[in-house]
Image (tube, rainbow, N blue to C red):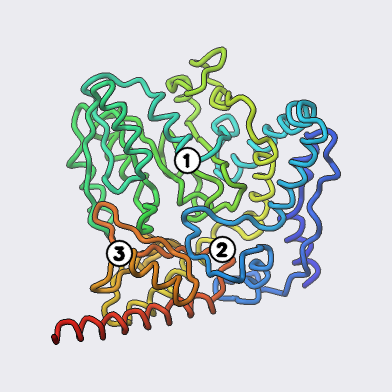
Amino acid sequence: MENLSRRNFVRKAGGLAGLLSVVPGIDALADPPLPTAPRWPDEDVTANEDYWGWVQKAYSVSPNIINLNNGGVSPQPILVQDALDRYNRLSNEGPTYYMWRSLDEGRESLRIKLADLAGCSPEEVAINRNATESLETVIYGLNLQKGDEVVLTKQDYPNMINAWKQREKREGIVLRFINLDLPIEDNQAIVRKYEEAFTSQTKVVMITHLVNWSGQIMPAALIGRAARKRNPGVHVLIDGAHSFAHVDYKVPDLEGDYFGTSLHKWLSAPFGTGMLYIRKEKIKEVWPIFAGADPQSGDIRKFETLGTRSFPTEMAIGHAVNFHQSIGSERKQKRLHYLKNYWLEKALDIPGVTSQTSLKPEFSGAIATFLIKGMTPAQIQSALFTKARIHTVGIVWENINGVRVTPHVYTVLKDLDRLVNTIRVIAKENAVASSSTSGK
């Protein structure tokens, strides 16, 4: 049973036949075998530390810091790093031959692999560099006129907000902002917020599926339905930068027309990799940022006219997909939510500690923010690193105020225990200092 489990994991995590069979000349670049896996049951392994200990060995994270800012960008498993290095060395043996005649052909197999993970057609997937590029391709590519309205929230990502503001300044479109007070544990209440902003002039609704600041999961499909009920022709654009390979879903489940994500976050793909999804019948309507011969084509590949890019980086994405699939989306989401609740439930028992993140799995995943009364996020972030070398990020953004903590599948419980213990020490020291100051 143990050997069978190991063979299945190796086949799924390291198998390259599907990718390399269509990339001539690089069939020898297969991944090395993974270490022998411990036995694990077929049922729920969310709290099985033997299983996750094996997963953790697939990473090369530093022992000198505790990295709890995976929401910014995640490290890559060793097999992804090694694949990137091999593809890069191969490219340098003959750049125009190996990059343009070999690796470039591998994009089609990679497209199939990503489409399988996303649950859509390969003809709806473009490969690019990050969520910003994906989403701004749509933001700048939609045909909008002066007076057309876009509904979005103040809690959306700044790059997207700024892109819409540029169109507002140049073309006179109208931005209608919703201001959310998070967390919200009522999907209908969220939908009503959007409904209040919809008018007959609403042409686009922008939805952040998982809010990067606090980890709130938004009911994207319900919001999109409400928008189409008010205006059947509305464009539904979804920012999936933090939900893809983090939350268990398929992109069409969100019922959006357009979807963009970064693959270097929760998928642990190479830095500077992203994916754009456009529903097949909508492709013709979007102008590409980098024009090809036919910018009004219905071919998703028109969005990949980027010139020379990092082909090794692109090809290594497939190895990250294999690794993710070997764990499984459902299993991964459960573990990430478990890790968040593991530390946050304990931290909330500490006097003075509050959070803007839900503990419920339908409204949150791995990301959470917390605050210690009387301290700024910057002060807490600095104290965590100074006292325990715990790397986090302070957040101050539109109704969000706290320190964001984001573990990943390689995070060990002992590190989260250190986080909680350090928060306890900081909170106690702050309370004593505040009491001393108020008593003077």
Query: Is any atom of residue 1 visible in this view?
Result: no
- Position of 140 compared to 128: left or right? left
Q: Distance between the Cα atoms at labels 2 and 1?
A: 24 Å
Q: Distance between the Cα atoms at labels 3 and 1?
A: 24 Å
Label 2: which secondary element: helix
Q: Distance between the Cα atoms at labels 2 and 3?
A: 25 Å
Residue type at mark 3?
A: Gln
**Hey, which quadrant is residue 414 in on the image?**
bottom right
Quarter of the image for the N terminus: give it: bottom right
Residue ID for mark 1 = 131
* In this view, 74 is above or below 22: below
Quarter of the image for the C terminus: give it: bottom left
- The outermost residue toward the top is 293
Using the image, tell me which numbered label, if any, was put on residue 356.
3
Q: Pointer 3: residues within 10 angstroms few (<14), some, or many (20+)?
A: many
Label 1: which secondary element: helix
Label 3: which secondary element: loop
- Position of 383 compared to 60: left or right? left
Disc on the earlier residue, 2 or 1: 1
Disc on the earlier residue, 3 or 1: 1
Q: Pointer 1: residues within 10 angstroms few (<14), some, or many (20+)?
A: many
Q: Residue at x 66, y 57 (%)?
A: 77
Residue 157 x, y percent position in the rendering: 36, 45
Using the image, tell me which numbered label, if any, was put on residue 195.
none
* In this view, 180 is above or below 234: below
In the image shown, does 126 or 227 lie closer to the viewer? 126
